[in-house]
Amino acid sequence: MAKIAFIGLGHMGGGMAPNLAKAGHDVLAFDLSQEALDRAVERGCTAAVSAAGACKDVEAVVTMLPAGKHVAEVYRASVFGAVPNSAILMDCSTIDIATARSIEEEAAAAGLTMVDAPVSGGIAAAEGGTLTFMVGGSGEGFAKAKPFLDKMGKAVIHAGGPGSGQAAKICNNMLLGATMAATCETFVLAQKLGLDLQTFFDIASKASGQSWSMTSYCPVPGVGPETPADRGYEGGFAAALMLKDLKLAMEAAEQAGAYTPMGGEAEELYRRFVDLSGGGKDFSGIIKMIDDSWKPTDGDQD
Ligand code: NAD
């Protein structure tokens, strides 16, 4: 089986790398955190002494890092000079489209094949190997990446050319952020209008207001399927990460000249929630800020 370098073993990478090892691959893992590295070794990976050290003689490289600056630094300083030209490079982090495109151009100029392959699905999907990968890059890059990504996900979709995986990811999450905020304010209004919330859920689930944010991820405890709302908004998808994705979406919208008022409003709401210490809560917890427990100050009311 193939030798794979895996760099970035945090909440997501720490679940994904062992799935490649479980599939029989020889996974050379590296993280700046010794604790994260030790955990990956316990789960079947081999520790590398550095990112460049992990990349020698491999058939594939996977990175799962916090943001664009970490990805640019790791590829420029450690990956490009160390990997053989035959290797497929897959960055699964969520980063800005411009950085993704420029790193992929640098890879191509060095004779390397690279794709952006961000994921949908959180820590549980990373552990369970049920992520959805949205892949940006050439057809050849997609074909080389897919067999590896298949071992970590339930769906691997070619979104288009370089940066298209990141574009699909932030468009999806802008829609998710906006529909969650709309779902939260709708349920707060429904309650104030005297509706029974389970009854309203049953009606809206079968009516034109239906959305994934409501039917699969209802922000109201005890209504709809079990969700983070039933666990005090713990676990799930952290509001701080939703804010990160909304910021990336707004940056991309500005660069593309797209008018995205709903995305902008969602970004503003999540920024306030994170400022009010909600960053570690699941993103559906924003309903706590939208209901009566939170009132805008005078300065916020413009
Ligand atoms: P994390 O902060 O838990 O993990 C990142 C890891 O990268 C850390 O262990 C850190 O030590 C390591 N790292 C940073 N710089 C490094 C370097 N130069 N060399 C080696 N290792 C380095 O983050 P995460 O939650 O695993 O998220 C990773 C990416 O996945 C982010 O881009 C995030 O937006 C995206 N994502 C996260 C989720 C989620 O639910 N957590 C869901 C979808 C997408």
Image (cartoon, rainbow, N blue to C red):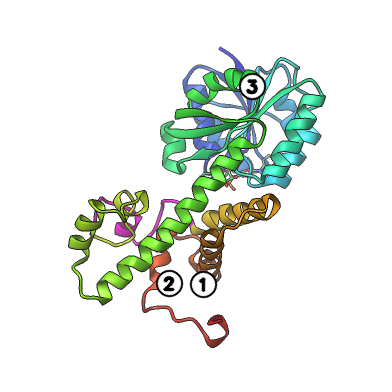
Residue pointed to by mark 1:
276
Residue pointed to by mark 3:
141
Counting residues from the N terminus, which is met first, the one under dot 1 or under dot 3? 3
Q: Secondary structure at mark 3?
A: helix
Tell me: residue 79, above or below residue 64. above
Nearer the observer: mark 2 or 3; the answer is 3
Across and down, in percent, residue 231 comes to 32, 58
Across and down, in percent, residue 109 comes to 82, 25
Q: Specify the quadrant that holds the N terminus.
A: top right
Question: If the picture is divided into quarters, which one holds ligand 1?
Answer: top right
Residue 228 falls within the magenta-colored stretch:
yes
Q: Could you tell me if the residues under marks 2 and 1 are in contact, i.e. CB atoms within 8 Å?
A: yes
* Amino acid at dot 2: Met
Could you tell me how far apart the alpha carbons at marks 2 and 1 are, in whole angstroms? Answer: 9 Å
Residue 18 falls within the magenta-colored stretch:
no
Across and down, in percent, residue 239 comes to 49, 58
* Amino acid at dot 1: Leu
> Which residue is at 53% across, 70% downward?
272
Between 42 and 280, which is closer to the camera in this rendering?
A: 280
Residue pointed to by mark 2:
289
